[in-house]
Image (spheres, grey):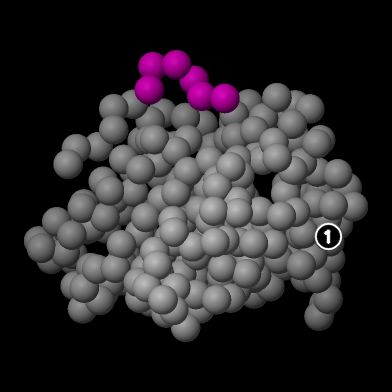
Amino acid sequence: MSLPEPILQPQMRQVHLALNPKGGVGKSLIMSAIAQYLRHIGEPARCFDADATTATFSGIKGLNVQRIEMRDGAAIDERRLDEVMEPLLTEDAHILLDTGASTYTVFANYLIENDVIATIEDTGKRVVVHAIVTGGATLIETLSDFQDLAAQLPESVALIVWKNEHFGPILSPDGKPFEEMKIFQDHRDRIHAIIHLPQRTSATFGADVAQMMKRQQTFDEAIKDTATKLMAKQRLKLVRDDIFNQLSQAL
């Protein structure tokens, strides 16, 4: 597998939002991968991290992510999101925002009360919402979260579903894959694309990606790092290339 070739014409500017109220489902990895892909194809991007508790996305220094301090003492200050809206609405660049589980409810309220999606679309940018469905014990919860997004988001929003099998295969109790579940059939017209993060061996692929995130590295930084073993470099290349090729079809 080879990496997608950089595009020759600029893409329509997009605003990427990772929306999920549950922590630990892979939002920061996904947003990091999107930022790295846009960099690979030569597209300008600004990245923001509005997670009030765990700033994983902004910890990846190579992506130059701007941290939005959401807390005012013990409380979360919704007005701090205005700091993102200024560049989001005015800059000629793609915008990536990781809200994190801790600020999901606040951000959802901010979107609705301020009519944010319509305001973004008025600037000519497209809103892309990334919904994450995971396997294992979190399957039912993340399917419910996807259901809420699909039902509530305006039809103009491009909805991308990430099937993350890190915790196990995404199968219904009767063994149906996501694409055969009723929830998918009900909302298939809303889904712009599906990106599959397949279940890989946790002791090798899983450990390599976890180590990369722990070191707060991009894929390329981890691959070039002399501390990364040769086979780990190869596995990280496989994961990176797989995600990038899927993103080249989705965005």
Residue at figure coordinates x 35%, y 59% from the top left: 197
Q: Nearer the viewer, residue 21 or 227?
A: 21
**Residue at x-position 34% and y-position 26%:** 6
Label 1 SS: helix
In the picture as drawn, the residue positioned furthest to the bottom comes out as 137
Residue 250 in the figure: left or right of residue 206: right
Q: Residue 198 in magenta?
A: no
- Left/right placement of residue 116 relative to residue 2 reads right
Residue at point 21% right, 73% down?
Answer: 201
Look at 44% across and 56% down and name the residue there. 179
Residue farthest to the right, as pictured: 113
Asked which quadrant contains residue 149, the reply is bottom right
Q: Percent from the top left, x then y, of residue 107?
A: 76, 59
Vertical relation: 203 (above or below) 103: below
> Magenta residues, as a range?
7-12
* Quadrant into which the N terminus falls: top left
Neighbour tally class for label 1: few under 14, some 14-19, many 20 plus, Cα within 10 Å: few
Q: Is residue 57 visible?
A: no
